[in-house]
Amino acid sequence: MLGGGSFGTAIANMIASNGHPVTLWMRDAENARHCMEVGENTPYLPGYKLDPRLQVSADLESALAEASVVFFSIPSKAFRGVCQQVAALIPAQTIVVSTVKGIEGDSFKLMSDILAEELNQPRIGVISGPNLAREVAAREITATVIASADQAVCETVQHVLQTAFFRVYANNDMYGVELAGALKNIYAIAAGMAASLKVGQNSVGVLITRSLAEMTRFAAHLGADPMTFLGLSGVGDLFVTCASDLSRNYRIGYALGEGKTLEQAIEDVGQVAEGVNTTRIVKEKAEQLGINMPLASGLYDVMFKGGSLPRVLLRVMLSEQADDVEFRVNS
């Protein structure tokens, strides 16, 4: 597992608990030593004990030695750089899996695209779903999706991850699953703002359902299967992150709703919230492609131009989009 943040730690610990040999790599050598000595990743998952079988290291070469499956849990801004670092250490046809819900800014590449570009003929998968790290660590009932065009990749990851409390479903729409995970972060910020401002439940219902419509419209325009968004990586993940203060993006939005600046909100959360960067990237892409996304565009104005959430909701109400359900299965 490359990446010692909260989610990478929770998943690596679960794999160790499953009896599979696993090493968690983190950049911070001091924290790696601390994790091994006290059995806890205090900065990211305080209070959660690590399985004694989990190895934690800051040495990339030793961490990757003989690895048959490599999970990448690296923030999107640093993702390509880490891929370039490890390219010579990962043999061809190794299974590589991204857990990252983000988009590379300048290129609009997803993490699976970067894995394909930077590594030597890897077998690629992505996992995404309503997977709050603290709940995974606490062994709350959870489900996720492994998506890959390679069925053997899906089966291997299901074997490695599945437990009595963590269910792993498969999907072959890797692009849709990955895009859903990135897009929902935008709307989790909006939901956090709505909670802070104590808007009515009718307004929350509008916010969440129109968020799903926007996500699906955008992704379908780019070639994803809109039906993917009815599953765990779409509506499941959207609901969880729009309803829980365990979501970093939700907490960013809540702080913004309290009147804090974006910089103050990010400092308060203290961890990477992918939705901030994703909002900017997606808003620009939507304008370039002519896709109607009033919520994402309005949220961009709130975060970067001093707009307000009530104006965002008004923009939705005045939007030209009049249909409730845009995608239907033909009978």
Image (spheres, helix red, strand yellow):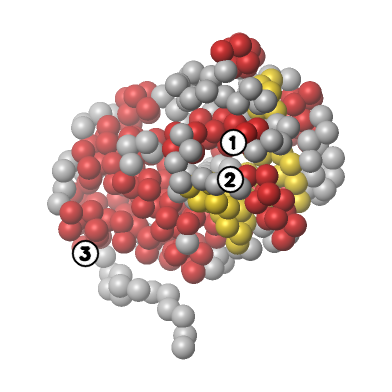
The answer to whether residue 10 is left or right of residue 2 is: left
Q: Which residue is mark 1?
A: 14
Residue 163: which numbered mark, if any?
A: 2
Label 3 sits on what residue type? Leu
The image shows residue 91 at horizontal and vertical percentages of 84, 40
Q: Which residue is mark 3?
A: 318
Label 2 sits on what residue type? Thr
Q: Residue furthest front?
A: 164
Is 122 located above or below residue 54 in the figure? below
Q: Disc 3 or 1, which lies upstream in sequence?
A: 1
Residue 325 appears in the figure: yes
The answer to whether residue 198 is left or right of residue 262 is: left
Residue 283 appears in the figure: no
Q: CA distance from mark 2 to mark 3?
A: 47 Å
Contact (Cβ within 8 Å) of mark 1 with mark 2: yes
The image shows residue 260 at horizontal and vertical percentages of 25, 29
In the image shown, does 218 or 253 lie closer to the viewer?
Answer: 253
